[in-house]
């Protein structure tokens, strides 16, 4: 199973997935966590999991449909984000589906526990369903 960690480790509000990485690797040693930058030719594997900071949510949330993200009008290249990137890949037929574990800009201990719970649930479901790619 592969999980992509997305964000910017240099920007405080976008670095939380990277800060969780040591704990994630310890909790899930059998999982391959890969750091990715959506602006650098990032094409995730189908049915993979992406962990990213999501603006506008106040709790940890699992997104399983790219259409759940609210589209907005882009006015510059700085508006190119993970949601837009994944929508383009889907439109081009490069991906079919991915799950995004969205983390709010600020997260407390219960939020970190929720991340672990959701990942355990996803990995258990994947282990029970051999049709899910790893």
Image (spheres, rainbow, N blue to C red):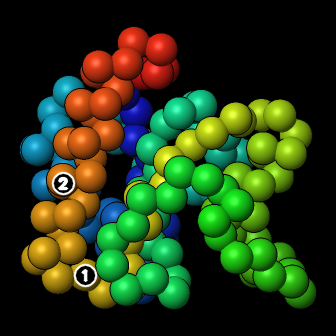
As drawn, the residue found furthest toward the top would be 130
Q: How many marks?
A: 2
Is residue 28 toward the left or the right of residue 78 in the image?
left
- Under tag 1, what secondary structure? loop
- Whether residue 11 is visible, yes or no, is no
Q: CA distance from mark 1 to mark 2?
A: 13 Å
Residue at image position (80%, 82%) is 72
Residue 61 screen position, x and y as percent:
39, 67
Instruction: Answer few, some or many: residues within 10 Å of disc 1's Cα (few below 14, many 20 plus, some between 14 and 19).
Output: few
Q: Are marks 1 and 2 in contact (CB under 8 Å)?
A: no
Instruction: Answer few, some or many: residues within 10 Å of disc 2's Cα (few below 14, many 20 plus, some between 14 and 19).
Output: some
Residue picked out by circle 1: 107
Residue 34 screen position, x and y as percent:
41, 42
- For the C terminus, which image quadrant? top left
Is residue 39 toward the left or the right of residue 19 in the image?
right
Residue at image position (58%, 31%) is 45
Residue 120 screen position, x and y as percent:
20, 42
- Whether residue 42 is visible, yes or no, is yes
Is residue 107 toward the left or the right of residue 34 in the image?
left
Quarter residue 111 falls in: bottom left
Picture disc at residue 57: none
- 70 or 37: which is nearer to us? 70
Residue 132 screen position, x and y as percent:
46, 21
- For the N terminus, which image quadrant? top left
Residue at image position (24%, 31%) is 124
Earlier sequence position, callout 1 versus callout 2: 1
- Under tag 2, what secondary structure? helix
- 105 or 118: which is nearer to us? 118
As displayed, is residue 51 above or below residue 10? above
Picture disc at residue 116: 2
């Amino acid at each position: 199973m592969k999980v992509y960690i997305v964000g910017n480790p240099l920007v405080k509000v976008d670095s939380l997935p990277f800060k969780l990485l040591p704990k994630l690797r310890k909790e899930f040693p059998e999982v391959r966590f890969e750091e990715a930058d959506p602006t650098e030719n990032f094409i995730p594997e189908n049915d993979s999991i992406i962990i990213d900071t999501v603006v506008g949510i106040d709790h940890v949330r699992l997104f399983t449909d790219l259409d759940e993200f609210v589209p907005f009008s882009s006015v510059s290249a700085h508006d190119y984000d993970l949601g837009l990137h994944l929508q383009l890949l889907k439109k081009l037929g490069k991906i079919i589906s991915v799950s995004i574990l969205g983390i709010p800009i600020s997260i407390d201990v219960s939020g970190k526990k929720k991340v672990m719970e959701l990942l355990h649930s996803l990995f258990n479901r994947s282990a029970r369903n051999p049709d899910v790619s790893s």
